[in-house]
Image (tube, rainbow, N blue to C red):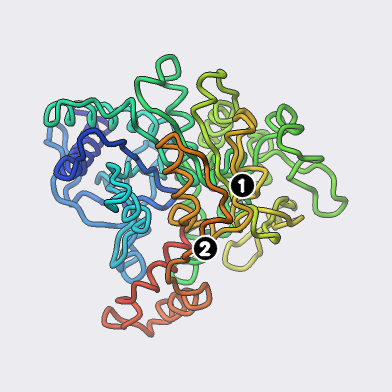
Amino acid sequence: MSYEAWRNEATRNVASVRIQEFLKHYRHGRPTVVLLPGGMGSRLDRSLDAYGRGGTPPREYDTVWADIGTLLARQALTLKIGRDGRDRDGHAIVANGPLEFLVKAYDGTERFFADPGVGFNYIVFGYDWRRPLAESAALLEDFLWQLRARVLDKHREDPLPDVTLFAHSQGGLVAKIFIHRVISNLHEWIKQLVTVGTPFYGTWAHQSRYFIGEPMLNFIYAGREMAPLIAALPGPYNLMFMSKGIYRENQQALGLTRYPMRTLDDDKDGADPYDVAGLERYPRWINRQHLHDAGEISKTLASPLPTEVARRVYNIRSSADKNTPVELTWDSLPNGFDPDRNPSPVQPGGRGLGDGTVPAWSAWHAGVPQENRIDLHQSLDHAFLMEDPRVLEIVKALICDGPIPEPKDVPPQPPAAAGSDEVKQLCEAIAMNEIGREDPRLEDPRMWRGVFRELMR
């Protein structure tokens, strides 16, 4: 058995356990919601055993994203993918539902759909956000097929035609690629796709990570460690702002008057992030193949859908934050660039409407009908959109084929979460060895919701 087959089998086995638990609470005759988390929003487990030719898939795992070990034991370094596509030291890393430590990401979403007054079936498709979108889309197809077979076997009911894919942020990109895989018979797979805060044309926060790493984790890990690690992960490359070609094709539909990548000095159209001919603008650790592949898959992400398929897709966005960066400037890379000493050459430019992470113009797909685009106008932080009562009531109405409620008619209920400064102080204390496992902050659910929020920006 090849390493890839071994890892895929491990992934399928973990998904099978999730489906088995789902079956215990399955409600016959009720719709099913399959949630796709945002980027960094899926829990990742690492096998205790390394790959051995002919060996059976692993059964025992340790959570490496994200738990206390991510902060105190430097487990994030195990997330690096080698140029051969293998996880570090030949261990398998597999997705296993949503982020979960003390609190579960999207727990408000789960409670809403499980409430007797709603009573939908609910399951999370965790995907490895480090891996290519196409791989995650293929695994989603396999997951749904396995779900169908298991429900048919136990409950004599096919759940797929009444499935709603409910996708947050990067999860919506996975779902869009999945739709193209099954586009000829989509009605046999799902009823509809609802995306929330999905960056179809990119998010402002990601590109800078290739230069200086992840801001929150840089307090604990050096930028010179984090930036190359992030560059080794193919999936997130598609979170950068769109290419010039996609901009030209969709400019009018997106309501843009100019390309969102700008030059620093004279405010002209800037460089294309997906142009492999411009690698000198990136640090040496950028992966040329990942950049090329992301550019190709972004064409599928941006491509229109047939009318009958597009009618099954809904985009929900928030345009409440008026200070969301909607443009970026990209300066040239200085000689001897050091992630721990130099600022990123990619900086926020113009600011406008969005959810703090995704510009409003990026969260509606140009090919989705106007009547299927929903703007909250007011909402929570990007990370908590899926738990916003207004979003959940809208999705409930879509599933029940009822009228879509006005978002203003449902009051927000923001979850209790530590602020950005509190999370920063925690990470700084860890970096200075001023904190141990007994520190009460590490047992505070508020703190972990704050950590999750920062990770999913």
Name the residue rendered at 70%, 57% in the picture: 348
Question: Which element is circle 2 on?
Answer: helix
Q: Earlier in the sequence, mark 1 or mark 2?
A: 2
Q: Amino acid at mark 2?
A: Gly
Closer to the eye: label 1 or 2 = 1
Depth order, front residue of 186/226: 186
| 45 versus 73 height, above or below | above
How far across and down, in percent of the image, does residue 392 sit?
44, 50
How far across and down, in percent of the image, does residue 71 sit?
36, 69
| 79 versus 134 height, above or below | below
What's the CA distance linking mark 1 and mark 2? 37 Å
Q: Residue furthest top?
A: 184
Q: Going by the image, does 350 lie left or right of 439? A: right
Decide: few, some or many residues near mark 1? Use Cα within 10 Å; few <14, some 14-19, many ≥20: some
Q: Going by the image, does 252 lie left or right of 103? A: right
Depth order, front residue of 318/44: 318
Q: Give the label on residue 375, or none.
A: 1
**In terms of image quadrants, where is residue 246?**
top right
Question: Which element is circle 1 on?
Answer: strand
Q: Amino acid at mark 1?
A: Asp
Instruction: Report if the CB atoms under discs 1 and 2 are less than 8 Å apart.
Output: no
Q: Which residue is mark 2?
A: 223
Q: Give the label on residue 194, or none.
A: none
**In terms of image quadrants, where is residue 278?**
top right
How far across and down, in percent of the image, does residue 419 sit?
50, 74
